[in-house]
Amino acid sequence: MTNKLIFSGVQPTGNLHLGNYLGAIKQWVKLQNAYKSIFCVVDLHAITVPQNPVELKKSILELAAAYIACGIDPEKAIIFQQSDVKEHTELAWILGCNTPLGWLNRMTQFKEKSGKNKENAPLGLYGYPVLMAADILLYNTNLVPVGDDQKQHIELTRDIANSFNQKYGKDVFTIPEPMILSQAKRVMSLRDGTKKMSKSDESEYSRINLSDDAETIRSKFKKAQTDSIAEIYYDLENRPAISNLLTIYASLADITIEQAQAKFANFQFSNFKTELAELAVEKISPITKKFNELKNDTTELQKILDKGAQNARTIAEKTIKQVKGVVGF
Ligand code: AQP
């Protein structure tokens, strides 16, 4: 166990999918044994887009259940709900007062999520990366294990931390680094190999949810996009869909993409898809089973989140005290 700390989170905005799992949570499970680990249910981030309050409440506990079902151990890692630790919003405001608009204007996620109607997008969606910086910096985080899509936000966090330290002439914040370990750093939609697999995609067939049953998984892979070239080989640029399927197989099997490619070189698409679906069922079914057992024990889940918040608060309170002192409060 090193002294380094990792922090990461997922939004409680519906079912976890294979992208969240392979790109982030599967890595966390390995890392929790080597690092001090904090995994957050980022509910404050979730409300940057409209949420149904009843559904949100349910999703928060379900995400905690999903973390545990995937293998996060609440005895090893802190699991907590972001809005339970008020220091996140306090620090976000202070950092926001030290973040130039020009930096936020470069963030691609805002552009994607606000769509064409930027004038009506809420301030919170625009400020999302500042809140994310606060999440990370509150805990003196060294490493942030995330998927590729979050790299830009971590770079912004570094810029904010460096400029704050410089402005106040003190090393208040540890400068974090992104940790992008997985070869499945960007799992793509099963319907369109050029689009990220995402919770908000309208098509259920675009993603494998961790709550999908075996038949649904099989049917989704069967319908997954391929292309007109008969052979199976990896070529991200020209064959994104098939490259995505090979990446998913390799990540689930814990082998390299080259190994996956060699294994399926002489396969037909249909046979490859069948093997892929069976492997996915084998890996996902135990998670789904555990998740279904845990999700109804809301008292236990709440207890885990409360204890996590208490532990998180102990660290966050120290940081915010120091920050307030430095800015002159
Ligand atoms: N497709 C993906 N491939 C690899 N990693 C991914 N992650 C998300 N999608 C992929 C990683 O999962 C973690 C948590 O993400 P999140 O749920 O908090 O937010 P998100 O990235 O906005 O997820 P979605 O599914 O794309 O949600 P919507 O549709 O609401 O925007 C992060 O580490 C992320 O990198």
Image: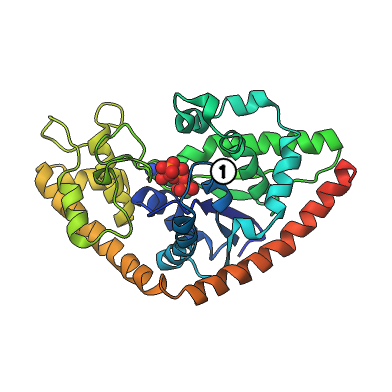
Residue 327 picture location, percent across and down: 86, 41
Relative horizontal placement of residue 184, taking residue 244 as reference (left or right): right
Question: Does 316 appear above or below 177?
Answer: below
Q: Quadrant of residue 228?
A: top left
Residue 55 picture location, percent across and down: 44, 57
The amino acid pointed to by label 1 is: Pro
Which residue bears the numbered disc 1?
A: 178
Asked whether 25 or 180 is in front, the reply is 25
Residue at left 29%, top 56%? 253
Relative horizontal placement of residue 273, taking residue 317 as reference (left or right): left
Residue 178 seen from this side = yes
Relative horizontal placement of residue 107, taking residue 67 as reference (left or right): right
- Disc 1: CA contacts within 10 A as few (<14), some (14-19) or many (>=20): many
Residue 28 picture location, percent across and down: 49, 58
Residue 61 picture location, percent across and down: 48, 64
Q: Within the displayed image, which quadrant is ligand 1 positioned in?
A: top left
Residue at left 90%, top 43%? 328
Question: Does 287 appear above or below 22?
Answer: below
Asked whether 1 or 73 is in front, the reply is 73
Residue at left 41%, top 73%? 296
Residue at left 55%, top 46%? 45
